């Protein structure tokens, strides 16, 4: 199974930004250089398991969560956990609106997917 390092780097960067953490802060928390963090996020360097575990710990997430999208077989549980984390910050009003938004999202996603598939055929 191949790891998509570009996707892995993007997930690390996104997680870091959500935590409002700079590359320098992540580097300090993981005992890595800022340049190495930048190289990993931009897929200029591959990362070993030990360093990936340190990054996951610093970002307070699992290694699976960082790898999920970069591997051919993703885990629905990982996405559910990520969504649950996002929902924790929602207000009661936002939670009331969410079911309707998700119903509409499903419809819009189907339209977009169909449109993308049509364009790929051209």
Image (spheres, rainbow, N blue to C red):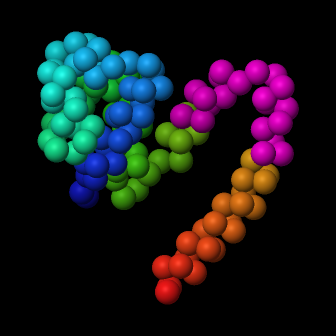
Q: In the picture provided, is 76 more to the left or to the right than 46? A: right
Start-end of magenta stretch:
82-101
Q: Is residue 11 above or below residue 107?
A: above
Q: In the picture provided, is 122 more to the left or to the right than 91? A: left
Residue at the spot 33% in from the left edge and 19% down from the top edge: 22
88 part of magenta stretch: yes
The residue most toward the bottom is 122
Please provide percent x and percent y for residue 50: 18, 29
Please identify the quarter of the rendering in which residue 46 is found: top left
Residue at the spot 16% in from the left edge and 44% down from the top edge: 44
Q: Is residue 115 above or below residue 45?
A: below
Q: Could you tell me what secondary structure mostly forms the magenta stretch?
A: helix
Residue at the spot 79% in from the left edge and 52% down from the top edge: 103
Please provide percent x and percent y for residue 61: 41, 26
Residue at the spot 22% in from the left edge and 13% down from the top edge: 28
Please identify the quarter of the rendering in which residue 100 is found: top right
Please provide percent x and percent y for residue 106: 72, 57
109 part of magenta stretch: no
Please provide percent x and percent y for residue 11: 38, 39
Asked whether the viewer can see residue 51, the reply is no
């Amino acid at each position: 199974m191949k790891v998509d390092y570009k996707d892995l780097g993007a997930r690390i960067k996104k997680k870091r930004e959500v935590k409002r953490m700079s590359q320098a802060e992540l580097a300090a928390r993981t005992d890595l250089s800022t340049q190495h963090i930048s190289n990993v996020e931009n897929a200029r360097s591959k990362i070993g398991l030990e360093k990936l575990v340190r990054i996951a710990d610093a970002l307070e997430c699992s290694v699976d969560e960082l790898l999920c999208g970069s591997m051919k077989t993703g885990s629905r549980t990982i996405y559910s956990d990520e969504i649950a984390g996002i929902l924790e910050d929602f207000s009661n009003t936002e939670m009331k609106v969410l079911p309707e938004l998700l119903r509409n999202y499903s419809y819009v996603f189907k339209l977009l997917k169909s449109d993308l598939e049509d364009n790929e055929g051209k």
